[in-house]
Image (cartoon, grey):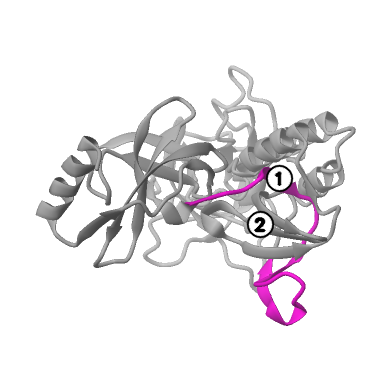
């Protein structure tokens, strides 16, 4: 037995619950986990030496260790960069490489066996690893093995490098929290995908987003424009505040797009609500009161909220208004 294996055996033996054996065959395998940590020793407690990403190829070095308690098997491997360490063998498999899903397809547990259909369905645009092929059947595994099984069809996957790059960029774009930015990124990808089978999918994802902000609604901020509201001629100065937003519930008296609720400002008062990027503002009219005990700065309709902040929850309002001279309480 090689000296290195003897040393590892002694270390594992002192820990208890481990057995060492040549249970892995040397060779190349592909990572199926989103990101798998490569550690200095088997198990989940060794120091982290490297991260192996989904779709990355590694070389198994022919050494394995089994945790007799959990049943997990860890294998020693080397990355393309030359780093070596241990990882759970469950997240690695032999395979052909990465591919992009072009159509939603049912996933089966076994090839050529329709009765083994599962409730899993491939999602167009996702990247999967092609593991094996049997005739028109292909075994695939997604990130963290979800989905995992067999799909049927010869033109439902693309292994083109350009399509893999587009799918990766699409996933990044769809993770963008701001709908307007997401739309802009997807629109750029639609142009890039002129000769790709992914172009219709990219266009559909872009068109499914809420329409972009109506620029007519956003009044450009001029250096002195937001300092005072001409509608309130009698004033004691301009107040600018930042605070929580209350989204007014839809009811029989559904608020208008630019109607707002406030704890104390007189009905008819005008309030400026600024866009978070400070590129403009909308002018609101106080038409109702906030619910008793509600500590929000201002209440606005759901439509107005999405116009100004998109679908991002928990936004903070920045408003300004001219304070009444009457001495009414100002939050």
The disc at residue 99 is 1
Q: Of the numbered discs in the image, which one, if any, rests on residue 140?
A: 2
Mark 1 surroundings within 10 Å by alpha-carbon count, few (fewer than 14), some (14 through 19), many (20 or more): many
Name which quarter of the figure residue 303 lies in.
Answer: bottom right
Task: Indicate the quadrant where residue 186 lies.
Answer: top right
First of labels 1, 2 by sequence position: 1
**Residue that protrudes farthest toward the top in the picture:** 223
Of residue 34 and residue 40, the one placed in the foreground of this image is 40
CB within 8 Å, label 1 to label 2: yes
Q: Quadrant of the N terminus?
A: top left
Start-end of magenta stretch: 92-121
- Camera-side residue: 186 or 152? 152
Q: Is residue 275 shown above or below 148?
A: above
Q: Is residue 177 visible?
A: yes
Image spot of residue 184 (x, y percent): 73, 34
- Asked if the stretch drawn in magenta spans residue 308, the answer is no
The residue shown at (59%, 33%) is 229
Position in image of residue 34 (x %, y %): 50, 47
The percent coordinates of residue 206 (x first, y second) are: 78, 44
Q: Secondary structure at mark 1?
A: strand
Is residue 234 toward the left or the right of residue 82 in the image? right
Q: CA distance from mark 1 to mark 2?
A: 9 Å
Q: How many marks?
A: 2
Q: Nearer the viewer, residue 132 or 323?
A: 132
Residue at the farthest left position: 14
Q: Specify whether residue 110 is painted magenta.
A: yes
Secondary structure category for the residue under label 2: strand
Residue 329 seen: no
């Amino acid at each position: 037995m090689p000296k290195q294996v003897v040393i590892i055996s002694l270390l594992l033996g002192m820990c208890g619950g481990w057995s060492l054996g040549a249970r892995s065959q040397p060779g190349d395998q592909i990572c199926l986990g989103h990101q798998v940590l490569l550690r200095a020793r088997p198990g989940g407690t060794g120091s982290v030496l490297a991260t192996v990403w989904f779709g990355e190829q590694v070389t198994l070095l022919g050494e394995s260790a089994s945790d007799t308690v959990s049943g997990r098997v860890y294998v020693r491997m080397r990355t393309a960069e030359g780093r070596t360490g241990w990882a759970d063998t469950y997240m690695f498999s032999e395979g052909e490489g990465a591919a992009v899903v072009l159509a939603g397809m049912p996933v089966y547990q076994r090839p050529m066996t329709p009765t083994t259909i599962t409730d899993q369905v491939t999602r167009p645009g996702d990247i999967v690893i092609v593991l094996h092929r049997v005739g028109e059947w292909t075994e695939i595994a997604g990130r963290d093995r979800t989905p995992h099984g067999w799909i049927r069809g010869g033109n439902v996957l693309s292994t083109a490098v350009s399509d893999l790059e587009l799918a990766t960029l699409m996933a990044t774009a769809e993770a963008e929290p701001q709908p307007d930015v997401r739309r802009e990124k997807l629109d750029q990808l639609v142009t890039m995908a002129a000769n790709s089978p992914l172009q219709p999918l990219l266009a559909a994802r872009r068109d499914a987003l809420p329409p972009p902000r109506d620029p007519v609604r956003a009044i450009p901020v001029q250096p002195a424009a937001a300092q005072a509201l001409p509608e309130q001629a009698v004033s004691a100065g301009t107040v600018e505040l930042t605070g929580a937003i209350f989204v007014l519930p839809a009811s029989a008296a559904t608020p208008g797009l630019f109607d707002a609720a406030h704890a104390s400002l007189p009905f008819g008062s005008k309030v400026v609500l600024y866009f978070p990027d400070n590129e403009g503002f909308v002018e609101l009219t106080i038409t109702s009161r906030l619910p008793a005990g509600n500590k929000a700065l201002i209440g606005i309709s759901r439509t107005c909220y999405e116009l100004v902040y998109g679908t991002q929850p928990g936004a903070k309002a920045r408003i300004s208004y001219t304070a009444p001279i009457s001495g009414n309480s100002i939050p």
